Image (cartoon, grey):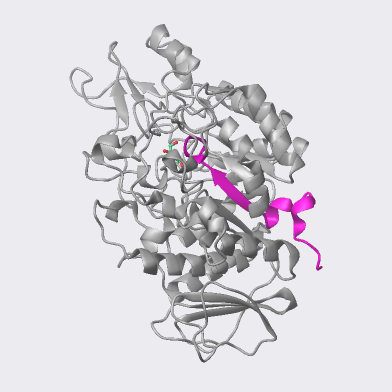
């Protein structure tokens, strides 16, 4: 057996496969309709069998859950709906024993309006020290009836809300998520303490939510289209913040992955300098349509932008904020764009699944680390959530035009024949599972060698044990424009056919894995990928 990838060394994160758990929807251990830590602990053997190196948990802290937990009221306690801190500690230790590291999600840009600091700020009133931890301002207009500036919210609508004493406070997301003032030393100190708190509990890494939004133009000037720098995205002050975070992480051997939505490659790479974040999500790849030329360009740009800073790339097709891959790739417009997501956009599930299978092999063969969002390994499509059941604030703030993100957050199907597909609930889960969900159940797929789950298990097994995966060079091979073909170390070759007709395979010694059957002439059909040993 060849040397496994670097999962057991301190560089494990350079080529790890990281599985994203959205705790509310992963597995329900106490039957109340909401996923929880007991559910995750019971399913750790499934994650070990799948073969992932780490699990990233979206926020599990005390929260009113206005934005799915990204509105944190207390960063040092687990929400009672999910369990207790003691259970989280057990979960971290049990996972580690199975070779799975834990990554927690820290939300530094904003807190919940129920957080002690914000409640104190409301109570203390204008001019108080408590208000300085946030962005409170008088309004504009004769009676201060207009918001202090015109910044648009990340979730449509206003970024300012007025409180009864007349002041306004800033929130880039919902009014229940007031933004912290990162120019305030206590805000910085508190977050470094929070990092220490979780590293001391054995977590291996931290995902940083909205990592490019923390620092604000001190003048809070109006937003002028096309004028740089943007008043709240990618401010230079952020790099100083992340340098001090890095020093904390280094004390514990912890690693960071930043949620950095920045299309500018050079600006993006600045966050990945050796004394800042270890990695950041590659949203350009996630947003790329199913098109060979555009994917190749994105892959090349990604590798080129990471190389000078020595950081590994990350590859991600899906997460809790975006349309599930199977549905997106089954649409006419396969690119991702928040703004074009609409109710009832048609999608061909069979086509989408074929492409998602091919995309999985493509992604897992690229140099760097890979993220798998829960249910991606089951080939789940985006679920249609009835309007009356929608919970996502993005939907409500769009005036009901955007379906929001609930369709990718529906509770997982574990067992085809159990109530609620074995999610574990004794009552209707917090989001309803659509009809036909049982067909995706993990138990059914585990028994089917042709299933998406079987493909993922085999791909991850090969990635762990065979030569050529993870960190290292990538060389493109000659191929038609609609085909991606590249070589990795040790003669590993990945070929993906994005054209309409079959494609010839390069000469090879053996076929390691295919996302679908070859045709009768040994050619690679449309929307199919293979791993070969050349
Ligand atoms: C990030 C999260 C998203 C959340 C937002 C506000 O983009 O991934 O789910 O709504 O930040 O915290």
Locate residue 222 relative to residue 460 in the image: left or right.
left
Q: Does 12 appear in magenta?
A: yes
- Determine the residue located farthest toward the top in the rendered image: 124
Tell me which residue sits at (66%, 40%) in the image.
102
Give the x, y percent position of residue 413: 47, 46
Tell me which residue sits at (46%, 50%) in the image.
261
Tell me which residue sits at (40%, 8%) in the image.
123
- Boundaries of the magenta span: 1-26
Give the x, y percent position of residue 298: 49, 67
Q: Does 413 appear in magenta?
A: no
Answer yes or no: is residue 395 visible: yes
Q: Is residue 29 above or below residue 340?
A: above
Residue 313 or residue 443, whichever sits in front: 443
Locate residue 479 relative to residue 404 in the image: left or right.
right
Image quadrant assignment for residue 527: bottom left
Q: Is residue 18 above or below residue 501?
A: above
């Amino acid at each position: 057996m060849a040397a496994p990838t670097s999962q057991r060394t301190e560089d494990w994160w350079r080529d790890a496969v990281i599985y994203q758990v959205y705790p509310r929807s992963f597995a329900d251990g106490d039957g109340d309709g909401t996923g929880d830590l007991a559910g995750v602990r019971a399913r750790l053997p499934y994650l070990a069998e799948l073969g992932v190196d780490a699990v990233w948990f979206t926020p599990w802290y005390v929260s009113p859950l206005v934005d799915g937990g990204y509105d944190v009221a207390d960063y040092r306690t687990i929400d009672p709906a999910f369990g207790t801190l003691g259970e989280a500690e057990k979960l971290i230790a049990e996972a580690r024993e199975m070779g799975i590291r834990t990554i927690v999600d820290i939300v530094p840009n904003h807190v919940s309006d129920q957080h002690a600091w914000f409640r104190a700020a409301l109570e203390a009133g204008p001019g108080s020290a408590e208000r300085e931890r946030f962005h409170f301002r008088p309004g504009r207009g004769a009676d201060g009836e207009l918001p202090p500036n015109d910044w648009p919210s990340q979730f449509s609508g206003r970024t300012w809300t007025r409180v009864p004493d007349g002041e306004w406070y800033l929130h880039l997301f919902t009014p229940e998520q007031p933004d912290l003032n990162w120019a305030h030393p206590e805000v910085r100190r508190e977050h470094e303490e929070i990092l220490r708190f979780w590293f001391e509990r054995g977590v291996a890494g931290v995902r940083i939510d909205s990592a490019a939004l923390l620092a604000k133009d001190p003048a809070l000037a109006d937003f002028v289209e096309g004028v740089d720098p943007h008043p709240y995205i990618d401010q230079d002050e952020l790099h100083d913040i992340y340098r001090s975070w890095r020093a904390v992480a280094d004390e514990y051997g912890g690693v960071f992955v930043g949620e950095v939505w920045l299309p500018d490659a050079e600006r993006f790479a600045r966050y990945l300098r050796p004394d800042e974040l270890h990695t950041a999500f590659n949203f350009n790849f996630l947003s790329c349509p199913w098109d060979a030329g555009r994917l190749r360009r994105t892959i090349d740009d990604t590798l080129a932008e990471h190389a000078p800073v020595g950081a590994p790339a990350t590859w991600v097709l899906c997460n809790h904020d975006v349309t599930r891959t199977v549905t997106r790739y089954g649409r006419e417009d396969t690119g991702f764009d928040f703004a074009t997501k609409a109710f009832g956009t048609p999608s061909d599930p069979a086509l989408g699944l074929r492409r998602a299978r091919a995309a999985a092999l493509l992604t897992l063969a690229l140099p760097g680390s890979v993220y798998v969002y829960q249910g991606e390994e089951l080939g789940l499509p985006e679920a249609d959530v009835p309007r009356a059941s929608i919970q996502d604030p993005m939907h409500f703030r769009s005036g009901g035009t955007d379906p929001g993100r609930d369709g990718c957050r529906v509770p997982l199907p574990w067992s085809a024949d159990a109530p609620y597909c074995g999610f574990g609930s004794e009552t209707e889960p917090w989001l309803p599972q659509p009809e036909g969900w049982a067909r995706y159940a993990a138990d059914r797929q585990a028994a089917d060698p042709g299933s998406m789950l079987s493909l993922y298990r085999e791909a991850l097994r090969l990635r762990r044990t065979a030569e050529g995966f993870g960190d290292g060079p990538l060389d493109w091979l000659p191929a038609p424009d609609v085909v991606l073909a590249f070589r990795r170390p040790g003669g590993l070759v990945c070929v993906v056919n994005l054209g309409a007709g079959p494609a010839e395979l390069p000469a090879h010694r053996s076929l390691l894995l295919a996302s679908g059957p070859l045709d009768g002439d040994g050619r690679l059909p449309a929307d199919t990928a293979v791993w070969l040993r050349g």
